[in-house]
Amino acid sequence: MSDQLRRIAVIGGSRIPFCRSNTVYFEKTNMDLLAAALQGLVDRFDLHGVKIDEVSAGAVTTHSRDWNLAREALQSTTLSPLTPGITMQQACATSLQGALLLGAKIASGQIDCAIAAGTDTTSDFPVTYGPKFSRRVAKLGKARSMQQRIAAFKGFSPAELKPVVPGNAEARTQLSMGQHCDRMAREWNISREDQDRLAMQSHHNAAKAWDEGFFDEIVQPWGGVSRDNNIRPESSMEKLGSLRTVFSTGGKPTMTAGNSTPLTDGAAAVLLASEDWARERDLPVQAFITAGRTAAVDYVHDEGLLMAPTVAVAEMLQRANLALQDFDHYEIHEAFAAQVLCTLKAWESEAYCRDRLGLDQALGSIDRDKMNIKGGSVAIGHPFAATGARILGTLSELLVQDGAGRGLISVCTAGGMGVCAIVERPAED
């Protein structure tokens, strides 16, 4: 343990292309995707045979076979087999939270290097049976005689074999995330036009970033694809406006598949370290994680499910003694265009900031030209647990490109939670 806190260095990120579910990665598993992203990081930073102190990774949609996902995936790479793996999950913030937890260990001197990663595929989703048939199988496993085996299936009905597929509804409300966001959009008076405009800009920014070569170092070709396949450079207000609405919970619906994130398969990873470890390996530091915060809202009793980042960011800014405007870049996860717009509107609201956040005044507006300038989740895609690492890797690369600066990351999650972080690159570095 160190007597003084050390800086948490972000060495850089790597990911595989993000692809719409049931397309390119249709036959790939979470293990396949995660191992590929980790290997991309190994290749980028020459970590072959290197023992990393800890690898934290997870997925949201998993099979029972994924119980030791992080450890098993890293053993499919050329990292040292002595590297330990920790499997964790905090919905869409999994890999960002992993980076914050690992970063705290680096800061305190418990470890010197780490990898935070995430993966998800909804192409390879788990299919199970209902509890009645599952109990029959359990009884069959305990049976010691033919009579007991036959008794296990007494009263059996073929209907018990109907598969149970994962749902996307919140367990406490039985509403999907999209339905919750539809309620938020109506509460905050977010228009269809504004949502479509944000979605269009996300696609245009992502397409431009690819064309300019920004992602060339970050994204490693894999599985027969070299670019994210959801990005639509030709996206326009006319095309987005022609899509039918979805997720309606009453009133006039405004959300569509075009201004929401698509179901996506993919994985991403980020290498973190102490400055000494990076120096010993001659690895330049891209940026530093300087703050982080997690918050939750009472969405069961009518707070907006995806509004927790408003709370997390406000608390983090107070602790860091910074204003919302003190950033060169804002990386706000676009679960839905409406969610981003609700968040921005809440920060601009004196009443919300006073009554909910306990502030004397509104946090204020941000410069939209600094937000998600290399594209966001609506365009790039959102493999749930991978998004935090994707954003952290992108922001760190952006700060290198700028030479210096400060960026804010904000990620909303299922379960009414939000995780945020501050990433900085000082001018002298």
Image (cartoon, grey):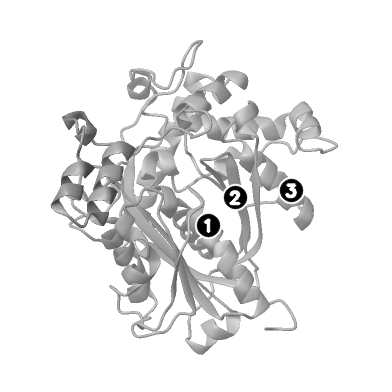
> Image point 71% across, 76% down: which residue?
5
Residue 313 higher or lower than 269, as above or below = above
* Residue furthest top in the image: 251
Closest to the observer: 75 or 356? 75
> Image point 35% across, 82% down: which residue?
81
Q: Is residue 342 visible?
A: yes
How far apart, in angstroms, are the residues tagged by discs 3 and 1?
A: 17 Å
Residue 128 image offset from top left, x and y in percent: 27, 43
Q: Is residue 16 visible?
A: no
Mark 3–mark 2 CB contact (< 8 Å): no
How far apart, in angstroms, are the residues tagged by discs 3 and 2?
A: 11 Å
Residue 280 image offset from top left, x and y in percent: 52, 89
| Residue hosting label 1 | 96
| Residue hosting label 3 | 315
Residue 188 image offset from top left, x and y in percent: 62, 22
> Image point 38% across, 71% down: which residue?
71
Callout 3: SS: helix
Closest to the observer: 361 or 371? 361
